[in-house]
Image (tube, rainbow, N blue to C red):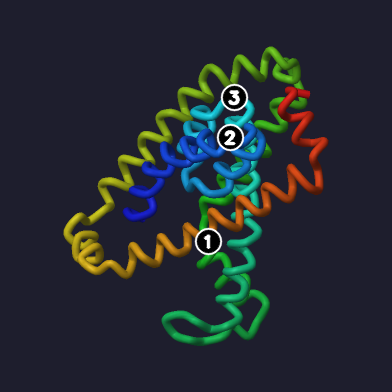
Amino acid sequence: MGISLAFTVVMMFTLPAVCNALGLDQVLAGAWIGGTVDSTGAVVAAGELVGPVARDVAASVKLIQNVMIGFISLGVAAWWARSGDGETGAVPTSFGGLLAEIWKRLPKFILGFVGASAVFTLLASVGPLAQQEGVTAMLKGPVKTMQSWCFCLAFVSIGLETDIRRLAAVMGSAKPVLLYLCGQAFNLLLTFTMAYLAFRVVFPEVASRLAGGG
């Protein structure tokens, strides 16, 4: 986690500079940033350094990734439970046992994503908040304040949980850093390729519409 956070800060500033240096349009740059920078807050900040369209595209791509976390986590939890790869190495034989093992291994934070999405979708669909002005006022008011506090608490908690002595011991070897750099380099290349194919080859009209604000 410490290595990821450290490189997230670096990429938050360097990737927009690379996009601007390469002369990428804001749609392609935003998709590249959204697919490679780890933290959602850092994605928005990095996209803003390129432009408003890049910020919105980057945030949208990152939100799609966040939604997919739930499905991927469920699949990994199910596979892990069926493989018997755990403390006891036992494979659940009953359906109820399998569900219990999946629940045990499933990251619970994804339920918060689903719950928050359901609540705000409902609020934006019925009642006075169904008007665009009501949604905008809510998002700019108490929700934005709550989001800022939650982000601060999350990063403070990560900092309090980080053991500098253990991190220093790991960082004493170059292997974890090299492993992260290799994975991130592959991620950068793959994401750029997919974004280029999506917005320059397969759906160029979508990129034009997004760039024009339509």
- Decide which of 74, 175 is in the foreground and name it: 175
Q: Give the SS element for disc 2.
A: loop
| Horizontal side, residue 168 vs residue 152: left or right | left
Please identify the quadrant where the C terminus is shown: top right
| Horizontal side, residue 133 vs residue 148: left or right | right
Label located before the other in sequence (2 or 3): 2
**Cβ atoms at labels 1 and 3 below 8 Å apart:** no
Label located before the other in sequence (1 or 3): 3
Mark 2 or 3: in front is 2
User: Percent x, y for residue 204?
Assistant: 79, 39
Residue 127 image-quadrant placement: top right
User: Percent x, y for residue 149?
Assistant: 40, 30
Residue 160 lies, with reference to residue 120, above or below; the image says below
Taking the view exactly as shown, the residue that stands out farthest to the front is 22
Residue found at x 65% / y 46%: 64
Residue found at x 59% / y 69%: 76
Residue 23: mark in rendering: 2
Please identify the quadrant where the N terminus is shown: bottom left
- Decide which of 145, 197 is in the foreground and name it: 197
The kind of residue tagged 1 is Phe
User: Percent x, y for residue 196?
Assistant: 69, 47
> How much space separates mark 1 and mark 2, taking CA atoms?
22 Å
| Residue with the mark numbered 3 | 52
Residue found at x 56% / y 76%: 80
- Decide which of 193, 129 is in the foreground and name it: 193
Q: Residues within 10 Å of mark 3 (few under 14, many from 20)?
A: some
> How much space separates mark 2 and mark 3, taking CA atoms?
16 Å
Residue 30 image-quadrant placement: top right
- Decide which of 52, 70 is in the foreground and name it: 52
> How much space separates mark 1 and mark 3, taking CA atoms?
27 Å
Residue 186: mark in rendering: 1
Label located before the other in sequence (1 or 2): 2
